[in-house]
Amino acid sequence: MSTIWKPSVTVAAIIERQNRFLMVEEDTPDGVRINQPAGHLEPKESLEQAVIRETLEETAYEFQPAALVGTYLSTFVSPSSGETVTYLRFAFTGEAGALTDRPLDHGIRAARWMSYAEILNCEHQHRSPLVLQCIDDYLRGKRAPLSLLFTHPSAL
């Protein structure tokens, strides 16, 4: 019997305001970690819908994606479970909108605006190496138009 391999599809928001990035501090099976607002693509949603939803759920900020920063394929071994997991991450940039009064998702301790130096200083706490890679690509000016993404209506 063969096993079906499939990566976990995730989205992340790279949001900069006044030289600070919107980050989340979250509880994970591997302890407290720092990440961008990020999460899994859910059934019946586009990648853009997923990143808007995840940003709102994890930070209480509305978000409007403007460009794709990059697509990342990465495999990790979880320190807590020893399980190998593959992620296909789509990182978006755009503007943070209004801060709503909704509670943050379960497991999210705080949403914080952090400088690049602060993010570098806590690299040992990053959820994955993709956290810094996405920010570095953003700072290098990597952008692709959202028109490159297509969601067939049958997927929604």
Image (cartoon, rainbow, N blue to C red):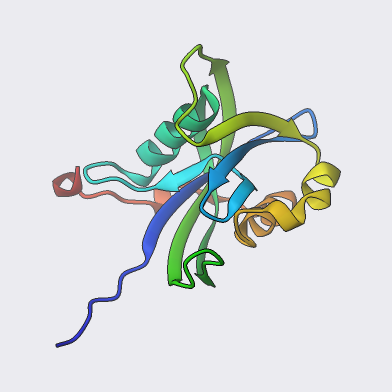
- On the image, the x and y values in percent for residue 109 come to 59, 32
Q: Residue at x 51, y 28 (%)?
A: 63
In percent of width and height, residue 147 lies at 41, 47
Q: Quadrant of residue 17?
A: top right
Q: Look at the picture and state if 123 lies above or below 66.
A: below
Q: Is residue 103 above or below residue 88?
A: above
Residue located at (19% from left, 86% from top): 2
Placement of 146 over or under 104, stated as above or below:
below
Q: Quadrant of residue 6?
A: bottom left
In the image, farthest residue toward the top: 101
Q: Is residue 136 left or right of residue 26?
A: right
Rendered residue at 49%/25% (across/down): 104
The x and y percentages for residue 41 are 35, 48
Above/below status of 56 relative to 79: above
Instruction: Give left or right: position of 81 versus 122.
Output: left
Residue drawn 37% across the image and 46% down it: 47
Residue 61 in the image: state x and y as whole percent.
Answer: 54, 23
Which quarter of the figure is the C terminus placed in?
top left
Q: In this orientation, does residue 147 appear?
A: yes
Judging depth in this view, the residue of 26 and 62 nearest the camera is 26
The total of numbered circles placed on residues is: 0
Name the residue at the bottom extreme: 1
Mark yes or no: residue 13 visible. Answer: no
- Of 97 and 82, the residue lying toward us: 82
